């Protein structure tokens, strides 16, 4: 089982962000930690001592919590579940809060062994456009401080397709990231969520995004650059040195069960899925109510089949067709005209028992996956009953 803990606080909301978060205050943080520990106790009793392979503390800005609060959450998890030896324990952090005196060294001693820093850009003008609280100098300083604190597994998050950014600027940013020598790099295309300040500025014409062709070049040339520097492109938005892929996220993409704690956190366990409410007050009422979650969804065979395809095709390994057949009873229709068109257009590879997106296919992954799912919807199972049932 994977364990995810959502920390719902930020100093201020970034202009592009759609994740649930609210303003930080010390009393609310104390209340939050107490609620998470209560939720852990309740779910731990209900689920039994399951083995936890990875822990991911995300947000929001988890580095706004104190090391003692982070330690309390990790201790609470260890008291209710069996933490696997050598488990990957990731903490997301922003550069400015990661640089609090002694913070990184203290969380490292607590067992956090992977740090994910939200850098986003190494250009101060673009960071200001995004509404980030740090500048490029502090991002570099935080990366060095992570090494000094003993972190040997460092991930840096970046965003491409920003207003005023072109291919040259993006490649310059990536060169700066490579110079920091992280083990892992995540590169996300800017997504403008309705109601976000950045989206409103674009709609109003105060800012303009790169043209579609320029954005495509950023993705393709950026990916090629990172691979040339030794970072394997193992998932649509993720690159890593050999053996440094995110074990937690790979667990998601391979369909592993996961338990989510905290406001807005989602869980998928034993064929069921539920989500905690986003607000802290609503979350408190949910925790007080116990293990029953309103809106729990029982995952049907159709849903699990679709998710198996969607998640697998996000990765470099792609969809194992023999495993897909064993799980669903469907023999993948290799000769389907739509599949043939995807192959001839260079968007997918089909060989060695796998269906994989090419880099060009990853750029338009949503459209390709939708087409593949449509093909499978009209392909009958070759067995009397799907093995999911």
Image (cartoon, grey):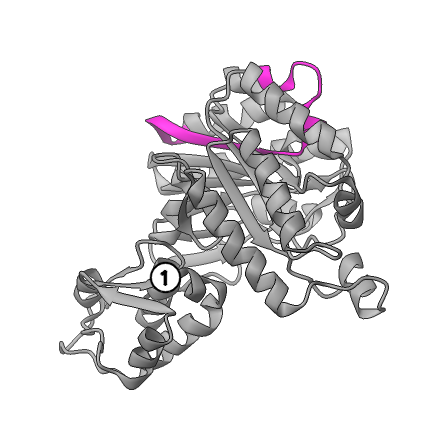
From the viewer's side, name the closer residue of 172 and 259.
Answer: 172
Q: Quadrant of the N terminus?
A: top left
From the viewer's side, name the closer residue of 312 and 343.
Answer: 343
Residue under the image location 29 percent in, 66 percent down: 349
Q: Is residue 210 above or below residue 26?
A: below
Q: Is residue 372 above or below residue 83?
A: below
Q: Position of residue 110 (x, y in %)?
A: 51, 18
Q: Quadrant of residue 302?
A: bottom left
Residue under the image location 37 percent in, 80 percent down: 374
Residue under the image location 58 percent in, 56 percent down: 218
From the viewer's side, name the closer residue of 362 and 106.
Answer: 362
Q: Position of residue 322 (x, y in %)?
A: 17, 63
Residue 65 visible in image: no
* Range of residues picked out in magenta: 80-105
Residue 39 visible in image: yes
- Residue 325 falls within the magenta-colored stretch: no
Q: Is residue 196 above or below residue 63?
A: below
Q: Position of residue 249 (x, y in %)?
A: 43, 45
From the viewer's side, name the closer residue of 346 and 147.
Answer: 346
Q: Position of residue 311 (x, y in %)?
A: 38, 59
Q: Quadrant of residue 356?
A: bottom left
Label 1: which residue? 313
Q: Is residue 311 left or right of residue 61?
A: left
For the view shown, which residue lies furthest in the front direction?
Answer: 168
């Amino acid at each position: 089982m994977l364990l995810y803990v959502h920390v719902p606080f930020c100093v201020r909301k970034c202009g592009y962000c759609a994740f649930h978060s609210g303003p930080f205050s010390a009393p609310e943080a104390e209340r939050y930690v107490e609620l998470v520990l209560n939720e852990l106790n309740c779910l731990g009793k209900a689920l039994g001592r399951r083995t936890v392979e990875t822990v991911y503390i995300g947000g929001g800005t988890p580095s706004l919590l104190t090391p003692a609060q982070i330690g309390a959450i990790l201790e609470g998890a260890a008291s209710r579940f069996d933490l696997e030896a050598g488990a990957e324990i990731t903490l997301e952090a922003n550069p400015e809060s990661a640089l609090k005196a002694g913070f990184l060294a203290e969380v490292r001693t607590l067992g956090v062994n992977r740090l994910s820093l939200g850098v986003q850009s190494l250009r101060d003008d673009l960071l200001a456009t995004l509404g980030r609280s740090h500048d490029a100098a502090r991002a570099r300083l935080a990366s060095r401080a992570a090494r000094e604190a003993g972190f040997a597994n460092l991930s840096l998050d970046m965003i491409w397709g920003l207003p005023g950014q072109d291919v040259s600027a993006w490649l310059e940013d990536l060169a700066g990231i490579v110079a920091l020598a992280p083990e892992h790099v995540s590169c996300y295309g800017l997504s403008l969520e309705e109601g976000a300040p950045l989206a409103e500025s674009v709609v109003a014409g105060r800012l303009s995004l790169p043209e579609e062709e320029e954005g495509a070049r950023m993705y393709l040339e950026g990916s090629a650059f990172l691979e040339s520097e030794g970072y394997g492109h193992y998932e649509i938005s993720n690159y890593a040195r050999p053996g440094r892929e995110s074990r937690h996220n790979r667990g998601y993409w391979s369909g592993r069960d996961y338990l989510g704690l905290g406001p807005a956190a989602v869980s998928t366990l034993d064929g069921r899925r539920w989500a905690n409410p986003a607000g802290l007050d609503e979350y408190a009422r949910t925790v007080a109510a116990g293990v029953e979650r309103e809106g729990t969804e029982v995952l049907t065979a159709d849903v699990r089949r679709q998710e198996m395809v969607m998640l697998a095709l996000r990765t470099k390994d792609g969809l194992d067709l023999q495993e897909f057949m064993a799980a669903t009873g469907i023999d993948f229709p290799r000769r389907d005209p739509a599949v043939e068109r995807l192959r001839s257009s260079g968007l997918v590879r089909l060989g060695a028992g796998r269906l994989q997106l090419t880099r060009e296919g990853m750029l338009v992954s949503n459209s390709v996956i939708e087409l593949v799912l449509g093909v499978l919807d009209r392909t009958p199972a070759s067995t009397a009953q799907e093995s999911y049932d």
